[in-house]
Amino acid sequence: MSPEAATARLSFVTLEQFVEQLPPELKMLHDGGSGASLLRWVEPSELEDPTPYLPEGEFLLTAGLPFLGEGGSAAKVDAYVQRLVGAKVAALGFGIRPYFDAVPDVLLDACRKHNLTLFEVPESVPFAAIGLEFSQLLETDNAKVFRRLAETNRQLMRAVLSPRPEHELLAALVQRVPVWAVLVGADGRVRARGHNAAGQNTAGHNAGGSSGVELSLLSPMLERLLSGSGPRVEMDGFEQPGSALVFGHPLRSTKDANLGALILGSDTPLTPAQNNVVQSAVGLLELLVRQRTSGSLAPSQLATAVLLHPDSLASGSTKHVNGLKDLLAQSLSSTRSGQMRVVQGVRVNGAADDGPVRELLQWRRLFDTKLVEITDYGFAAITRLKVDDSLLSDVEKLGWRLVIGEPTELLGLQAAYQRASSLRSRVVTTGKSARVDEVTWSVAGLLGREAGTLLAERLLAPVLELESDRRDPLLAVLRGWLSENGSWDGSAKLLGLHRNSVRRQIGVLAELLDMDLNQAQVRAELWFALQYVDELVAGLPVDGTGD
């Protein structure tokens, strides 16, 4: 078989192709029309219902154990076949003996009724032989070619997401294809080179320091590549080792402007599979140079304006500010009047660390924005999206929690960021995402339940350790006294106690807590702690010991 045919023939194994490899003793009793369907695996099973364990496109083998006794009734067999069809089983193979001497008529009738392909497997053909034949078919040269191509494309994609994508992509290319490689920019200068681990090119030498030939010898080819138009391949050849065949690919913009070129050299023609890898690399390099040179210009213009004229947001003319609003809208795929939100992301336990480049691209995609910053706490983004519960759920599944800002405009972005930042510690403490517009903007609201109960537990511990008949009256007196701003008469009236009783119990509290209750800061902290004490008390046993 030619390399071209090997590349074009199979990207998967069909039932028909598999049956062609099986012993002729296998007899097809019913053709359900699944010959062209993808066959994923071959599996023997004697379960009454194997469908929970079957992938789509299975060739299921059974010796008939599910059909013994009551399982052989027409209704049970019909239900069995119906389940297989629902699970998209490609075919059923029924093995003769030890349980049956022939395929039961009820099974054949059910397969015809539900159109499931059915084979009779004679005793002379073990199930293991059928499984082995399928495994061997998967290991044919065709299947290997496509597996290698898939693996190579994954490696190329990983290179694109690396911090030095052009260099890593060329390194991956020369690792998979026996060539030397040099990437040249539109100015004719070398941007990246493909070397092996020893620092040399794949031809095993260092001529020119970058390719199998001196860069000056490639000038005529480069001139043709950078001056032509349309998709094309320029060819040349040199006497230097590894350079008998030199071919160049232009890197073009979406409007067919030449942005650079990829030049490769080898001593032998590339196989179709290797050419496939080269074409993938050319496509990814074009994507990279397009993003750098002809992608959206708005984010870079916006960043330049803000960096060079940071005060212009507040003091700039209306025309200048409107220009910034337009650039911001383009960066968010929005309109000048469209509102936006500041989003801050915090990594929690279990979140994968994919590196800054991959994470940056991930957040840009999820929040549909080009304005994303990787920070020491995680990331910050400006987005036009409302960040609904569905998007929030997708982000939280990745192991992150969000602070989602309220709608704002250009001049309100800094304040919106500050408000979001004030909630970040709460998100870290609670492990729960928060929306700025749903938070109660008070000290108690910003503290949150977890931090508030921790504060109450720490400050009021000596009182909480008392038995309930002492603890509860003291807490009631403290709450009433603080609510009346330390007024003895006011708190006595509120509590229905004599003022001397209130004074005496406040003295007991001051001694227990070892605090000066005359200080405003102490009173404030105790007041906030009391907002969360009821939940703590409810969790204590009646004797108040907590044990």
Image: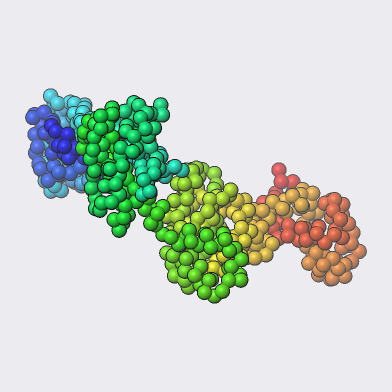
Question: What residue appears at the point 13 percent right and 47 percent down from the top-left corner?
Answer: 115
Quadrant where the N terminus is found in the figure:
top left
Seen from the viewer's position, the closer of residues 380 and 101 is 380
Please state the total of marks drawn on the protein image.
0
Q: Is residue 215 left or right of residue 429?
A: left
Seen from the viewer's position, the closer of residues 497 and 481 is 481
Answer yes or no: is residue 272 visible.
Answer: yes
> Residue 507's quadrant in the figure?
bottom right
> Residue 156's quadrant in the figure?
top left
> In the picture shown, does residue 341 fall above or below 76?
below
Question: What residue appears at the point 11 percent right and 28 percent down from the top-left corner?
Answer: 23
Name the residue at the bottom extreme. 318
Pinpoint residue 289: horizontal percent, then vertical percent.
37, 50
Pinpoint residue 383: horizontal percent, then vertical percent.
48, 62
Q: Is residue 27 left or right of residue 529?
A: left
Question: What residue appears at the point 16 percent right and 31 percent down from the top-left corner?
Answer: 95
Seen from the viewer's position, the closer of residues 144 and 153 is 153
Question: What residue appears at the point 85 percent right and 59 percent down from the top-left corner?
Answer: 519
Check the image and tell me how it is coloured: rainbow
Seen from the viewer's position, the closer of residues 347 and 43 is 347
Answer yes or no: is residue 143 visible.
Answer: no
Pinpoint residue 390: horizontal percent, then vertical percent.
44, 58
Name the residue at the right extreme. 500
Name the residue at the top extreme. 124
> In the picture shown, does residue 478 fall above or below 336?
above
> Residue 121's quadrant in the figure?
top left
Pinpoint residue 105: horizontal percent, then vertical percent.
10, 40
Q: Is residue 165 left or right of residue 274?
A: right
Quadrant where the C terminus is found in the figure:
top right
